[in-house]
Image: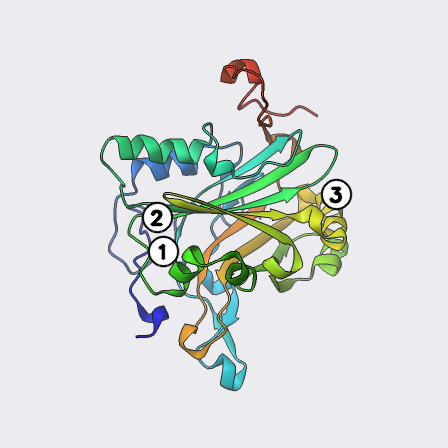
Amino acid sequence: MCPTKQKHRPFAFETAGKCSRSTSTPSLKIPDWISESINGGSLRCVDLHTGTNGWASPPGEMFSLRSKNYFTKRQKSPSGEHLLAPVGMDWIRSNGKLDNVLGRADNRVAQALRKAQSDGKSLKSFVFAVNLQIPGKDYHSAVFYYAAEDPIPSGSLLHRFINGDDAFRNHRFKIVNRIVKGPWVVKKAVGSYSACLLGKALTCNYHIGANYLEIDVDIASSAIATAILHLALGYVTSVTVDLGFLVEAQAEDELPERLIGAVRVCQIDMSSATIVEMPTTHPPQSAAARGMGAKVNQ
């Protein structure tokens, strides 16, 4: 059986909202832990077309991926429904590189899911996260979260990716990006639309928990990527970019490609970042003493 033909039901939110995606699937009530995750964090969920200093979820049709006949005709087509639902974004500042954020006791998305599961809900939920680690005087992390309430279909390309080894993941993990809005210099440096196998271009570290997979992408592992990103950050308040994450199809029966999830980052303010301190060997302090959740003032 073709793995890409296995049914994988995406979320359909009960009411159409600025962070929901339209779908032909009958409407379902969004679980409380997902609603909490979407509405939390330092960056708001904003309108797809007019929002600023926040994030939104662009539809798959805005991304051109490998079509069913790609290997015979080299054709691409708009992506269909995302495989997973968006459940939030974190914009974090720290005094060092943050790894495995979903494994931290203070991670708000993991906390929300643990609470739901302690109440006997969402017991089959799975979270997929991408953590873009941005070097600088202080480190920043842009963390994007996606989730499924149903088990990932066994034998599907996404299931193979989650349960595969790092070598397989490095050869398959792809990002596609498009500059929606921004100055010419950023479009020239980044490209209006581009795709990249992140596991080959940058160092990616994979963290697997009982109900999650997190991919930490170390931007500092590439001097070129660091330079381009720092250029873009200089114009960050005027840049809107779409990012899509997927497992690259490399065989006929893996086509067509499908996005795991996508995010639109809308003209963010660097000072919106939440401060998170690096783990230390000192006795644990209260969240208030550490300043967890405080906004950065620059």
> Are discs 1 and 2 less than 8 Å apart at CB?
yes
- Snapshot quadrant of residue 141: top right
Which class describes the residues within 10 Å of circle 1: few (<14), some (14-19), or many (20+)?
some
Task: Report if residue 253 is visible in the image.
Answer: yes
Q: Residue at x 27, y 41 (%)?
A: 122
* Kind of residue at badge 2: Ala
Q: Look at the numbered discs 3 and 2 and tell me whether their residues touch, using CB distance below 8 Å.
A: no
Residue 49 location, x and y as percent?
52, 50
Closer to the observer: label 3 or label 2?
3
Quarter of the image where the C terminus is located? top right
| Residue type beneath disc 1 | Ser
Q: In the displayed structure, would residue 286 be above or below residue 112?
A: above
The quarter in which the N terminus is drawn is: bottom left
> In the rendered image, which residue does mark 3 sit on?
234
* Farthest residue, direction bottom: 72
User: Which residue is at a point 67% across and 29% down the rendered structure image?
Assistant: 95
Asked where in the image residue 176 lies, by quadrant, the reply is: bottom right
Q: Between residues 214 and 294, which one lies in front from this camera angle?
A: 214
- Dot 3, how many residues are within 10 Å of its Cα: few (below 14), some (14-19), or many (20+)? few
Residue picked out by circle 1 = 22
Q: Is residue 137 left or right of residue 282?
A: right
| Colour style of the rendered protein structure | rainbow
Which residue position holds label 2? Answer: 16
Q: Earlier in the sequence, mark 1 or mark 2?
A: 2
Label 3, label 2: how far apart the Cα atoms are: 34 Å
Q: CA distance from mark 3 to mark 1?
A: 34 Å
Q: Which of pointers 3 and 1 lies earlier in the amino acid sequence? A: 1
How far from the left and from the top, in percent, is residue 142? Answer: 58, 41
